Image (cartoon, rainbow, N blue to C red):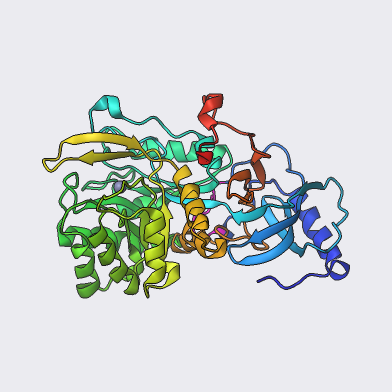
């Protein structure tokens, strides 16, 4: 927790920080603070952003800090002051009243099909790209894009172009290289090359295992890919993680267990996702979390009687287990199709994932009586630490100004990404170039 700050003693420092911040190009701050990805999602801007002070807001950093005021400039958090302090008098300062609101770190969605996924029911079922406001109106300020079943007609180049487009629009965006299949879809010809040479690429995924749509990778093939991710992460100071898509198959996580038993690779390299899609699979994942893996729950819809846990149920079961709290992450599968297959592999029905499912899960857990500060890390700090995004996932001095304001009911009122408002008092401020007004609907308010 930041130390209490006295205005009397800290104002000169605030003024100095503020003058530096206003002189800075708002999206060109030094990037190494944010881990190995040097570019850090920031694009050159044409005008310096104003200093903003959010007053009287209850801060969940994600730890509960109580009533605070947040000074923002140059795309960063410059000061987190006690709410009782008088507002600093700084030229051009814009003051936002946060009374009755809760400030949380912007959510990090580590599994989003930014190009649009799908295509598993024919070409006509290819999902269109996800426009900017579908993320921001869901409170997501950092996204990691990826390819899935279709890593052929959807290419790594298209994925990177979509990531760069989101960066141009003010979001922090990254990518996994590869996709479901082997050999992995890459731009440079290798997983190591993509992670080391391509700035947005932080790891490899979603390589599919225990799924009829996978390449049926062998144990040795899995080890080879994981080792490439690990070494490339060491070279580039990036996450270097193998993000694994888990299917419904009964083999579950057996390959990963064997890798932990027999190889020298650290457990953190393996990041299995969709682990709540079968109840028995979730128990396997809990065991891996105890052994050092971070496990990823998907916030997909679950029907009554289904052999799956909803994200809220999975969160509760995780918390009730003896697995360390920091090893749980939750993502949305935004833009991906959520197909249901019968026992013969025939497609029965298809839905599309949305980042809005993250906030819906947070609201569900709040409604069940869980404290916000316990809920948030799986959507913020835990993800940032796994992905080595050091300026993300927390509200603290020096962190990126990525935050969301929630009202009493857990609905979003405002979203700021890299110091710029994308949603202000419930109104969408920014949209993708070809996004219609209803494309940015406040779908988290379902
Ligand atoms: Zn998947």
The magenta-colored residue range is 34-41
For this orientation, the residue located farthest to the left is: 344
Nearer-the-camera pick, 241 or 127:
127
- Res 10 → quadrant: bottom right
For this view, does 411 lie left or right of residue 160? right
Query: As rendered, which of 298 and 419 lies closer to the eye?
Result: 298
Is 205 above or below relative to 270? above
Look at the image and say whether residue 40 sits in the magenta stretch. yes
Position of residue 271 measured from the top left corner of the image (x, y, whole percent): 34, 60
- Number of numbered callouts drawn: 0
Is residue 234 in view from this perspective?
A: no
Q: Is residue 368 left or right of residue 283?
A: right
Q: Name the foreground residue: 167 vs 109.
A: 109
> Where residue 62 appears, x then y in whole percent?
58, 63
Q: Which SS does the magenta portion mostly show?
A: loop
In x, y percent, where is residue 157? 37, 37
Residue 122 forms part of the magenta stretch: no
Residue 364 percent coordinates (x, y): 48, 52
259 above or below 218?
Answer: below
In the image: residue 18, left or right of residue 300:
right
| In the image, residue 148 above or below residue 262 | above
Residue 440 visible somewhere in the drawing: yes
The N terminus sits in image quarter: bottom right
**Residue drawn where x is 44% and y is 35% of the image:** 130
- Residue shown at 16% from the left, 62% from the top: 219
């Amino acid at each position: 927790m930041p130390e209490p700050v006295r205005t009397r003693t800290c104002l000169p420092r605030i003024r100095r920080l503020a003058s530096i911040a206003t002189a800075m190009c708002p999206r060109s701050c030094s990037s190494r603070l944010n881990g190995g990805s040097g570019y850090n999602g920031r694009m050159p801007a044409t005008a310096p952003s104003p200093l903003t002070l959010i007053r009287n807001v209850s801060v969940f950093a994600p730890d509960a800090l109580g009533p605070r005021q947040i000074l923002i400039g140059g795309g960063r958090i410059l000061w987190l002051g006690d709410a009782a302090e008088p507002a600093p008098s700084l030229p051009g300062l814009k003051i936002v009243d946060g009374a009755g609101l809760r400030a949380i770190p912007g959510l990090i969605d580590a599994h989003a099909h930014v190009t649009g996924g799908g295509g598993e029911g024919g070409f006509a079922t290819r999902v269109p790209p996800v426009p900017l406001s579908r993320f921001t109106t869901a409170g997501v300020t950092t996204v990691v894009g990826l390819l899935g079943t279709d890593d052929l007609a959807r290419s790594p180049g298209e994925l990177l172009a979509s990531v760069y487009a989101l960066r141009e629009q003010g979001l922090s965006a990254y990518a996994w290289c590869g996709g479901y299949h082997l050999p992995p879809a890459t731009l440079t010809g290798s997983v190591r090359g993509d992670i080391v040479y391509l700035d947005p690429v932080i790891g490899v995924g979603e390589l599919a295992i225990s799924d009829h749509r996978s390449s049926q990778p062998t144990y040795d093939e899995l080890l080879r890919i994981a080792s490439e991710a690990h070494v490339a992460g060491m070279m580039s100071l990036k996450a270097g993680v193998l993000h694994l898509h888990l299917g419904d198959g009964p083999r579950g996580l057996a390959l990963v267990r064997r890798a932990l038993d027999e190889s020298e690779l650290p457990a953190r390299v393996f990041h299995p996702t969709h682990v709540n899609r079968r109840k028995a699979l979730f128990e396997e994942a809990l065991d891996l979390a105890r052994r050092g893996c971070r496990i990823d729950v998907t916030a997909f819809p679950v029907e009554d009687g289904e052999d799956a846990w909803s994200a809220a149920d999975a969160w509760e079961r995780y918390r009730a287990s003896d697995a360390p709290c920091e090893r749980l992450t939750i993502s949305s599968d935004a833009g991906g199709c959520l197909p249901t297959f019968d026992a013969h592999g025939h497609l029965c029905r298809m839905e599309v994932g949305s980042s809005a499912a993250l906030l819906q899960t947070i609201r569900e857990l709040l409604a069940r009586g869980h404290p916000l500060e316990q809920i948030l890390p799986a959507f913020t700090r835990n993800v940032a630490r796994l992905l080595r995004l050091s300026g993300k996932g927390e509200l603290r001095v020096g962190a990126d100004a990525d935050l969301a304001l929630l009202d009493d009911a857990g609905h979003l009122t405002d979203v700021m990404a890299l110091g710029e408002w994308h949603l202000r008092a419930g109104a969408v401020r920014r949209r993708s170039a070809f996004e219609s007004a209803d494309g940015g609907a406040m779908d988290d308010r379902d």
